[in-house]
Amino acid sequence: MKLLRMLSSLERWDGHRDVNRKNPTICGDAIADLRTSNNCLSTWRSNDENEKDIAIVALALGRDKAEKLCFVLLDENELHNIEIEISDKCKGRAGGLNEELLNNHRDLIELDYNHIGKLANYISPMVREGHFEVVTKLQIKELLTSFKERNLIDVTKVNDNLKHDLSW
């Protein structure tokens, strides 16, 4: 299984941010992308293009504006190798997204300091080697419009700022 995890800034992960220390590791700012809640980190199932689109739309619905989105695809087997568990117990949250599609949400669970570090060590080389994707603002708008036209988004439940940005 592949899991999509959004990254706020590729520059935090690709080694371009200097850490002026002897033997620096991953930029400390990158860890902000791994901020947990109740020791869980939100991801979205993304085994094919349809699931990837659902994940992107879900993430876009959590924002105030349609804007560029960067992400990596995490491999379940690699997560297992670094002792990170995946749970499907919590439905995703994405204002207005069809309830059934919220079931594509997955949490990485029971994360502690050590396992967040292992996850960072897994993600950083992926980004440095170009194993990430970027969805443009235009692509985000097109996806959101497509989901809306297929009645997969209830516009009345979308946050007002995003509705205004999309002229919905």
Image: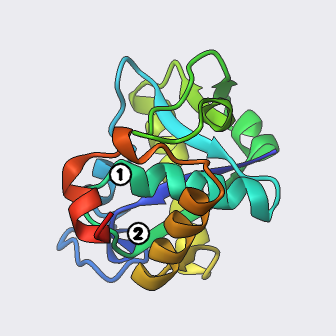
Residue matched to label 2: 13
Which percent across, then down, holds residue 118? 54, 43
Residue visible at 21% across and 63% down?
164
Q: Nearer the viewer, residue 86 or 103?
A: 103
> Could one spot residue 22 in this view of the protein?
no
Q: What numbered label is drawn on residue 109? A: none
Residue 56 located left or right of residue 31? right
Which percent across, then down, holds residue 19? 22, 71
**Marked residue nearer the N-terminal end (2 or 1):** 2
Label 1 is placed on what type of residue?
Asp
Q: Residues within 10 Å of mark 2 (few under 14, many from 20)?
A: many
Where disc 1 sits, the SS reads helix
Label 2 is placed on what type of residue?
Trp
Q: Which tag is nearer the camera, tag 2 or tag 1?
A: 1
Residue visible at 53% across and 56% down?
57
Which percent across, then down, holds residue 155? 40, 48
Q: Quadrant of the C terminus?
A: bottom left
Residue 63 located left or right of residue 77? left
The image shows residue 81, relative to residue 89, as above or below, that is below
> Could one spot residue 65 in this view of the protein?
yes
Residue 138 image-quadrant placement: bottom left
* Disc 2/disc 1 C-alpha distance (Å): 10 Å
The image shows residue 48, relative to residue 81, as above or below, that is below
Residue matched to label 1: 33
